[in-house]
Amino acid sequence: MNLQQLRYVLEVAKRKLSISEAADALFTSQPGVSKQIKLLEEELGIEIFVRHGKRLTEITEPGRQVIAIAERMLREADNLRAVGEEFQNEEVGTLTIATTHTQARYALPKVVGEFVRRYPKVQLHLHQGNPTQNCEMVLRGQADIAIATEAIADSPDLVMLPCVQWNRSVVARPDHPILRSQPLSLEAIAQFPIITYDSAFTGRSLINKAFLGRGLKPNVVLTALDSDVIKTYVSMGLGIGIIASMAFDPMIDRGLAIADASHLFESSTTRIGLPRNAWLRGYAYAFIELFAPHLSRAIVDAALAGGGSDPGL
């Protein structure tokens, strides 16, 4: 058994059981991948994949357990390499953050600016997706840190660290009657076409919950993946928008006006997601603390090790 065989198994599973795609991704030959997987199966005395002729059709039950263990072993192997890199050069490397558009556009710029200033030799990569995609990127080893809301809490293989609480506001064109509704209410909002986030994003379930709790059915005419798109269509007069309050910039959004709606919806918590027992480079701790000053290295280490209490906000 060797780590390369485990990589082959994981890549085949990731590529929907396509040996040819796995071989291309790993820059090797298809027969080589097939041979090494077969050798591993013979050594373990089990079949990892169900075969139909030369095709793999599904993963066996013992195969699923092998894949789960292989993921942990390869993650630990990466940790070993990271230890060496850390002590060879503490300020050189890469850091990949998987996050949503709203976080990347509105919450992270100052953090990223300060991080780049402190660690000019670290290559920082930002990948944007919905919260579920961000979690999957971290679990697959394609990103070091996930930053998102809600979905991270549903991923048992990630350590979740609360960073900041936020709420929502209504945006509309300055002459829209919703801005004259005092106090702002769900009943008033429900009278107008609404543009807000897609159901996979940014606390949308809490928006739905608030209306449902009052027996209201909001007229959601358009959903989008990020705040800027929502504001674009609000400015066209297609409806009023419900967005994260952080996503409104009075200097940029001069054609719109905002009304605080934090009294109408439950607050949401942005979290950082990390793989359990992950080994982080020193600059990764620095990025986390820049984003959430209450998350010191000691608190993060305790959470990764499975100890300590919820650090709170």
Image (tube, rainbow, N blue to C red):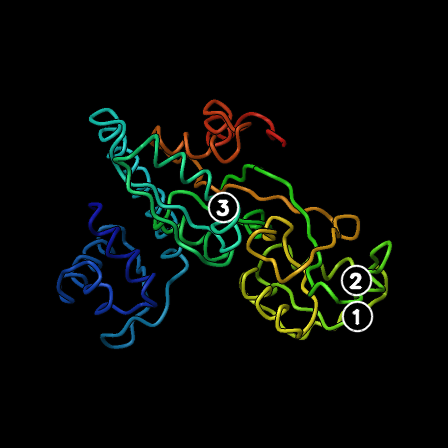
Mark 2 and mark 1 in contact? Answer it, CB < 8 Å.
Answer: yes
Residue at the top extreme of this rendering: 298
Residue at which label 3 appears? 147
Amino acid, disc 2: Phe
- Quadrant of residue 63 in the image? bottom left
Q: Which circle marks residue 262 in the picture?
A: none
Q: Secondary structure at mark 2?
A: helix
Amino acid, disc 1: Lys
Q: Secondary structure at mark 1?
A: loop
Q: Position of residue 238 (x, y in %)?
A: 66, 75
Q: Residue at x 29, y 70 (%)?
A: 56
Disc 2 versus disc 3: distance between alpha carbons? 27 Å
Q: Residues within 10 Å of mark 1 (few under 14, many from 20)?
A: few
- Report the side of 83 relative to 238 (left or right): left
Residue at which label 2 appears? 211
Q: Secondary structure at mark 3?
A: strand
Q: Position of residue 137 (x, y in %)?
A: 40, 53
Of residues 285 and 126, the one nearer the viewer is 126
Badge 2 or badge 1: first in the primary sequence: 2
Residue at which label 1 appears? 217
